[in-house]
Amino acid sequence: MRHALIFAAGLGERMRPLTDRTPKPLLPVGGKPLIVWHLEKLAAIGVHYVVINTSHLAGQFPETLGDGSRWGLRIRYAYEGETPLETGGGMLHALPLLGSEPFIAVSGDIWTDADFASLPAEPPGLAHLVLVDNPAHHPYGDFVLDAQGLLHDTGEPRLTFSGLGVYRRQFLDGWRDAAGHAAGAEATPPRFKLVSLLRAAMRKDAVTGSLHRGVWTDVGTPGRLQSLHAQLCATGADRTA
């Protein structure tokens, strides 16, 4: 996989006041901006092109990250305007920059020690998602992983989508039908969540998954950011990554 997409267009409302002046993916944790941890991991597995979608305080991303050459990457920015396009609309908007091969997509506001090299270069279906055990703030989970590695939207026990996955371009082919009558789907550019497309693909047994039992944090609040920072500093991850 030569291309990757980092979702970084969110408004960071739950992180205020920290995000009043800094986009959430650029907040420092463990000695570097949160998004830099992703860039380093992507570069380490041979990704060459990274698309970062932006909205809130968009100008700070190129100011901080530049063109990606310091990591051996080429970064391109997909500006979504003042109103973010959600995950599905953001992926659709960035698709022309993502090449023809399957690509990695990762949320810019998570931290994980998951091995990006373990992601399938060619998912057997339309997408492959990395799941984690349900955190305290999301106890009911998202999807079910069966014994054959397929994901389902119904059933038990449920696991939480980590925000890390691999997608084929064809995953977005039926986006309009899958997004249905969601508010914003008829806008230009369209705005819709990725989950509606994932559910549609799961009904066709076209989404596989794997379970990551290592470290994972959804950095959604100042408290979680502070806890992650303390954890990274205590383990020395900021010096070894």
Image: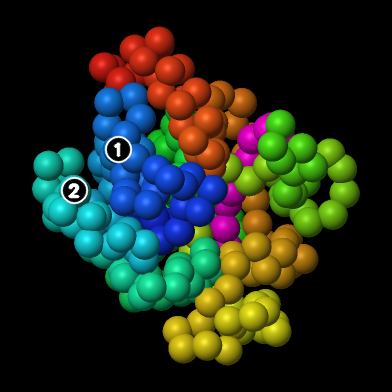
Question: Callout 2: few (<14), some (14-19), or many (20+) C-alpha neighbours within 10 Å?
Answer: few
- SS type, badge 2: helix
Residue at 28% in and 17% down: 240
Residue, far right: 155
Q: Is residue 96 above or below residue 160?
A: below
Q: Amino acid at mark 1?
A: Pro
Q: Give the main secondary structure, helix, strand or loop, of the magenta stretch.
A: strand
Q: Quadrant of the C terminus?
A: top left
> Which residue, given by chain and number where applicable, does mark 1 sit on?
33
Q: Residues within 10 Å of mark 1 (few under 14, many from 20)?
A: some
In percent of width and height, residue 173 lies at 55, 79
Residue that label 2 marks: 64
Residue name at image x 58 percent, y 73 percent: 192
The x, y position of residue 196, in whole percent, is 67, 68
Determine whether the residue tagged by mark 1 lies in a helix, strand or loop. Answer: strand
Residue in view at x 12 percent, y 48 percent: 69
Residue 71 visible somewhere in the drawing = yes
- The answer to which quarter of the image holds residue 117 is top left
Residue 118 colored in magenta in the image: no
Task: Name the one closer to the observer, 54 or 116.
Answer: 54
User: Quick check: can you spot residue 3?
Assistant: no
**x and y percentages locating residue 184 in the rendered image:** 58, 81
Residue located at (36% from left, 75% from top): 81
Pick whichever of labels 2 and 1 is earlier in the sequence. Answer: 1
Q: Is residue 113 left or right of residue 197?
A: left
Point out the stretch of residues depicted in magenta. 126-135
Colour setting: rainbow
x, y percent for residue 190 = 51, 82
Question: Do the numbered discs 2 and 1 sit on residues whose CB atoms are within 8 Å?
Answer: yes
- Left or right: residue 236 versus residue 13 is left
